[in-house]
């Protein structure tokens, strides 16, 4: 094992304050905003009102810790709010609240410039284009997640061949089945209560609407996972998924899958993993915002029945990640595939986490190898450790033997916020681990 100096920057105690500076206004012709009215009957947030370039943006709500999990030891801060709109160019967003916004943190910290109004109840935010971020007047207690999306390009039309279309309004299909060459479109302002099973080739799930699983109890949703994928050339793009009752987006035995610009508003139940590529290859997860109770992204080789059942060539990039209880990245757990390799995790903002955010735990002789983690920024809140490379034996295994970890690169991984307690472990490395390198490079 090769250890190179100066892997991780631990920046001591860091208190974020809003940048108090004049917001520059772009010419009207250079900016565009598209908003989507919430459907009648959809309960909106009592805590926040939002406008973008003067246009009202409806603010939705999401729950945390439904029964039987309510009242447990974890504190997720209660219900929270989120809002979607589309932008191009520089846009001014106004957020008003009955709550004081004086101590508001914006995470990621570099997302926007902000001006606090003297009344303490209004923030003016300047966006230079699409951004996703969390606005937190009181930490995890009732934040507002703002999703400023890129403009839609060529959305499908109702009645077009191969298109399953849900326009603005509340819909209750429960179980949506997609197959070869079909597109599921959720228009902005649509709240679609149910789940999706996509099996076949050339399938798209797109739009600015909400796929809502929050009417179902834990593990009792209408589909095995909220979005269950088993196919080739599958795209999930732009939608918001609220209140998963179990795992959220799951490509299984799939190839060439792209998950782009998806917003996951979870934390309602345990086991609501965000995106879990299982026995899949060539998966791209990009420009997503993921808040979950359980793992944000878990790579799993649940079984091994043929030559193409490894987990290979998976990239997670340009995402904002928040996990209330479990891991940000879990690689190798519950896995019996021979290989999990060629994994890239880059340009990520981890804004809240509890347990070790990078947990690599292969078993069953699995080779977990060729992993690159680079340009990752974590907001520390006193956690005990943040990297664990440790082949294990656990209850999910048949042969009951550990796996192997090899050729791992961590580069430019930084932790701001509260330091780890003195004497606590920062990186844990177990047996059957070789060729691990840590490096930070000055910008």
Image (spheres, helix red, strand yellow):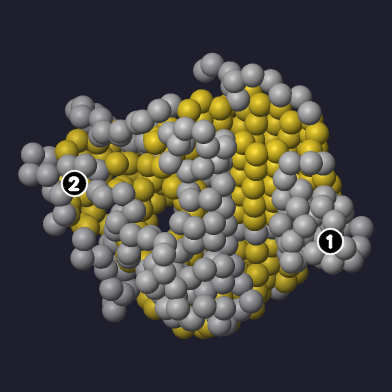
- Secondary structure at badge 1 equals loop
Q: Which of marks 2 and 1 is in front?
A: 1
Front residue (pair 43, 171): 43
Tell me what residue is drawn at x 54 percent, y 61 percent.
294
Residues at circles 2 and 1 in contact by the CB criterion of under 8 Å = no
Q: Which tag, 2 or 1, sits closer to the chain's start?
A: 2
Residue 422 sits above or below residue 384 on the image: above
Which corner quadrant holds the N terminus? top right
Residue that mark 2 sits on: 101
* Residue lying furthest left: 119
- Secondary structure at badge 2 equals loop
Left or right: residue 252 versus residue 421 is: right
Tell me what residue is drawn at x 41 percent, y 69 percent.
72
Residue 364 sits above or below residue 104 on the image: below
Is residue 400 visible from the viewing direction of this image? yes
Tell me what residue is drawn at x 74 percent, y 41 percent.
430
Q: Distance between the residues labelled 2 and 1?
A: 52 Å
Q: Position of residue 119 (x, y in %)?
A: 7, 44
Please tell me how crowded label 2 is: few (under 14), some (14-19), or many (20+) other residues with Cα within 10 Å: many
Front residue (pair 187, 271): 271
Left or right: residue 232 versus residue 387 is: right
Tell me what residue is drawn at x 25 percent, y 43 percent.
104
Q: Position of residue 10 (x, y in %)?
A: 48, 28
Residue 33 sits above or below residue 182 on the image: above
Residue that mark 1 sits on: 400
Indicate the quadrant where residue 113 lies: top left
Q: Which mark is residue 116?
A: none
Residue 366 sits above or below residue 203 on the image: above
Indicate the quadrant where residue 393 lies: bottom right
* Residue lying furthest top: 442
Front residue (pair 330, 306): 330
Total number of numbered labels?
Answer: 2
């Amino acid at each position: 094992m090769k250890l190179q100096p100066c892997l991780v920057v631990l920046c001591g105690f860091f208190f974020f304050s809003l940048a108090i500076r004049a917001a520059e206004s772009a010419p009207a012709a250079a900016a565009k905003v598209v908003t989507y009215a919430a459907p009648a009957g959809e309960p909106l947030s009592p805590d926040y009102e939002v406008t973008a370039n003067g246009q009202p943006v409806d603010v939705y709500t999401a729950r945390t810790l439904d029964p039987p999990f309510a009242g447990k030891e974890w504190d997720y801060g209660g219900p929270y709010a989120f809002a979607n709109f589309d932008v191009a160019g520089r846009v001014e967003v106004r957020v008003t609240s009955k709550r004081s916004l004086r101590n508001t943190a914006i995470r990621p910290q570099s997302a926007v410039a902000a001006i606090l109004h003297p009344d303490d109840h209004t923030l003016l935010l300047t966006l230079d284009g699409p951004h996703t971020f969390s606005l937190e007047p009181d930490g995890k207690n009732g934040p507002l997640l703002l999703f400023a999306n890129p403009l839609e390009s060529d959305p499908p039309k109702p009645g077009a061949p191969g298109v399953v279309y849900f326009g603005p309004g509340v819909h209750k299909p429960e179980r949506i089945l997609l197959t070869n060459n079909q597109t599921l479109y959720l228009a902005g302002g649509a709240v679609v209560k149910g789940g999706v099973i996509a099996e076949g080739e050339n399938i798209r799930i797109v739009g600015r609407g909400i796929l809502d699983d929050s009417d179902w109890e834990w593990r009792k949703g209408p589909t095995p996972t909220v979005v269950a994928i088993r196919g080739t050339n599958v795209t999930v793009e732009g939608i918001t998924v609220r209140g998963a009752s179990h795992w959220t987006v799951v490509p299984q035995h799939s190839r060439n899958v792209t998950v782009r610009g998806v917003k996951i508003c979870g934390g309602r139940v345990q086991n609501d993993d965000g995106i879990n590529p299982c026995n899949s290859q060539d998966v791209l997860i990009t420009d997503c915002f993921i808040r979950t109770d359980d793992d944000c992204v878990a790579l799993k080789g649940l079984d091994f029945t043929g030559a193409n059942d490894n987990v290979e060539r998976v990239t997670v990039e340009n995402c904002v990640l928040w996990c209330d209880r479990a891991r940000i990245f879990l690689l190798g757990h519950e896995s019996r595939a021979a290989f999990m390799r060629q994994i890239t995790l880059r340009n990520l903002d981890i804004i809240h986490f509890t347990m070790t955010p990078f947990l690599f735990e292969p078993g069953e002789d699995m080779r977990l190898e060729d992993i690159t983690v680079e340009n990752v920024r974590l907001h520390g809140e006193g956690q005990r450790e943040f990297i664990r490379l440790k082949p294990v034996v656990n209850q999910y295994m048949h042969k009951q033997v550990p796996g192997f970890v090899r050729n791992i690169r961590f580069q430019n991984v930084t932790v701001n916020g509260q330091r780890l307690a003195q004497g606590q472990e920062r990186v844990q490395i177990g047996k059957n681990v070789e060729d691990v390198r840590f490096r930070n490079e000055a910008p």
